[in-house]
Every structure is written in structure tokens, then in C-alpha cells.
Image (cartoon, rainbow, N blue to C red):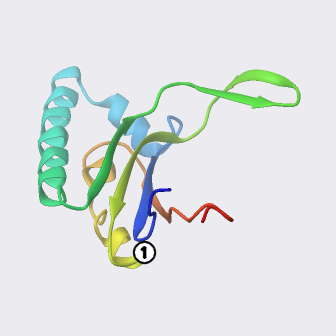
Amino acid sequence: MSDNSNTYLAVFLGSRTSSSWKAWEALSEDERRAREREGMAAWHAWVDKYKDAIAAMGGPLGKTKRIDKAGVNDIANEMGAFTVVRAASHEDAAKMFVNHPHFAIFPGERVEIMPVLPIPGGG
């Protein structure tokens, strides 16, 4: 079993119907490309700053399929990407994402941080 202590899942969220996304889409193509370059440079700087705390880089998420008793269906949700980090506390993990480029530059709306818990009875 792996040790999940001090491990946190960060989920990057945003909606294509949000005002921030609509403002992003209203940018000219040149403005959007410039913001994308700025955003990616800032994201890489964030990764470099926290490289020792990043347990799994994660990445962007694609289209979602929901599987339940009714079968398999295509659905939409607000999840856009994920990263796994290690930190001394939940609060410390959350502080890593203050002013993150996901919402400070890109049209993402928020990052949610949750602890990765041990599997019950996992020994």
C-alpha cells in the first residue's frame, strides 16, 4: 500500500457558461494567444516553485462518461485538470494554489483541494 499521508488532490474547475469563459472567448485570437502564452509561462513557474511538493503532475481532463446502473452516458462537468501535491496540512496545500494561473490568467474559476485518505482496512 502507498502512504497517502499529507497527500492532496487538486481539481481545477470551470464552466464554459461562466462569465470568465465568455470574456475569454470574446478576446481576439491574438489577445487569446498572448494570454495563453502568459498563462503557460505562469503555470510553468508555479510548477517550478512547487516541484518538490508535486506528487503527480496530473494534466488536463477530456470528455466525461458516466457509468451507472442505466449504462454509459456522455456528460458534462466542470472538471478541467488535476494535480496531486504533498503538504504538511490541508491549509498548506490550499495556499499553494492562491492566485494560480488557472483562474488568475485563464478562464478557470477555482481549484478545490481535498486530502487523499487511506483506504479503509487497507492495512
User: Residue 72 vs residue 24: left or right?
Assistant: right
* Residue situated in front as seen by the camera: 47 or 6: 6
* x and y percentages locating residue 19 in the rendered image: 46, 44
Q: Quadrant of residue 104?
A: bottom left
* Residue situated in front as seen by the camera: 63 or 35: 63
User: Residue 98 vs residue 74: left or right?
Assistant: left
* x and y percentages locating residue 36 in the rendered image: 20, 33
Residue at (44% x, 63% y) in the render? 3
* Residue situated in front as seen by the camera: 5 or 113: 5
Number of marks: 1
Q: What kind of residue is marked 1?
A: His
Q: Quadrant of residue 41?
A: top left
In this rendering, the answer to whether 81 lies above or below 112 is above
The residue to which callout 1 is attached is: 90
Determine the secondary structure under disc 1. helix
In this rendering, the answer to whether 69 lies above or below 116 is above
Residue at (71% x, 30% y) in the render? 66
* x and y percentages locating residue 17 in the rendered image: 53, 37
Q: Residue furthest right?
A: 70
* x and y percentages locating residue 92 in the rendered image: 33, 76
In this rendering, the answer to whether 27 lies above or below 114 is above
Q: Quadrant of residue 120?
A: bottom right
Residue at (27% x, 30% y) in the render? 27
Q: Name the image quarter holding the C terminus.
A: bottom right
Residue at (13% x, 34% y) in the render? 37
* Residue situated in front as seen by the camera: 10 or 15: 10
Rate crowding at label 1 as few (under 14), some (14 to 19) or many (20 or more) other CA atoms within 10 Å: some
